[in-house]
Image (cartoon, helix red, strand yellow):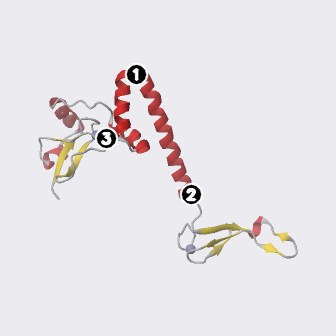
Amino acid sequence: MALEARICPKCGSRGLVPIEADRKCFCGGTEIIFNVTKEQYVKMSDYEINKMIEEMNIQPIISNEDAHTIYDVTHSTEIIDAMIELKQKDIIEYGLKLSQFKNQLEQRNQVNQQEQNQVHCPRCGSANITAGQRGYSLLTGFVGSGSTVNRCANCGHKWKP
Ligand SMILES: [Zn+2]
Ligand SMILES: [Zn+2]
C-alpha cells in the first residue's frame, strides 16, 4: 500500500495515509500533501516536521486535540466551524464551551467504563448474564443474598457472585 504524508491546514492533523485515501480531514479541512517521500517523513523529528509546516506557511486555526474533542461529541464539522469562529471572537466563551464538550466526553467514557465493568461469565466470558436472581424457598420466602446465583445465558454456567 503506497502511503504519503499529509497535513490538514485546518486542525493540524498530520501523518501517513494511503495515496488513494480521500483528502478530506474529519474536521472538514482539505489535507495538503507534504513535499517529502514517506521514507523521508518517517525519519523526520517533530521539530523538523514543525519547521516544514512553518515553511509551508500552514497555521492551523484550531488545535487537533480541540477539533477531535468537538467532533467526538457532536460529529459535526459545522460545529467545529462555529467553534473556530467563536475562538476568534471570544476566546473565553470558546474555552467554556470546549470544557463542556470535554465533560460530555468524559461522562461518556465513564459510561463505557461501567459497561466494561459489568459481570462476565467466568467460564466463557459472555456478558449475557441473568444476574443475581434470588432463589425462592417455599418455607421461608425469599432466601438470603448468600444464595444469589448468576447464570450465563450463553453457556449455562452458574456461579455465586
Ligand atoms: Zn483537520
Ligand atoms: Zn458462560
Q: Position of residue 68 (x, y in %)?
A: 37, 41
Q: Earlier in the sequence, mark 3 or mark 1?
A: 3
Q: Which residue is mark 1?
A: 90
Report crowding for label 3: few under 14, some 14 to 19, many 20 or more residues within 10 A (C-alpha).
Answer: many
Circle 1 SS class: loop
Whether tag 2 and tag 3 are in contact, CB under 8 A, the answer is no
Nearer to the camera, 24 or 124: 24
Q: Earlier in the sequence, mark 2 or mark 3?
A: 3
Q: Give ligand 2's quarter of the image.
A: bottom right
- Residue at 54% over, 50% down: 111
> From mark 2 to mark 3, how far is it between C-alphas?
32 Å
- Residue at 38% over, 26% down: 86
Circle 2 SS class: loop
Of labels 1 and 2, the one closer to you:
1
Residue 40, disc: none
The answer to whether 127 is drawn above or below residue 91 in the figure is: below
- Residue at 40% over, 23% down: 91
Q: Position of residue 32 (x, y in %)?
A: 18, 40
The answer to whether 147 is drawn above or below residue 26 in the figure is: below
Q: Which residue is mark 3?
A: 27
Q: Which residue is mark 2?
A: 117
Q: Residue furthest front?
A: 78
Q: Amino acid at mark 3?
A: Cys
Q: Earlier in the sequence, mark 1 or mark 2?
A: 1
Whether tag 3 and tag 1 are in contact, CB under 8 A, the answer is no
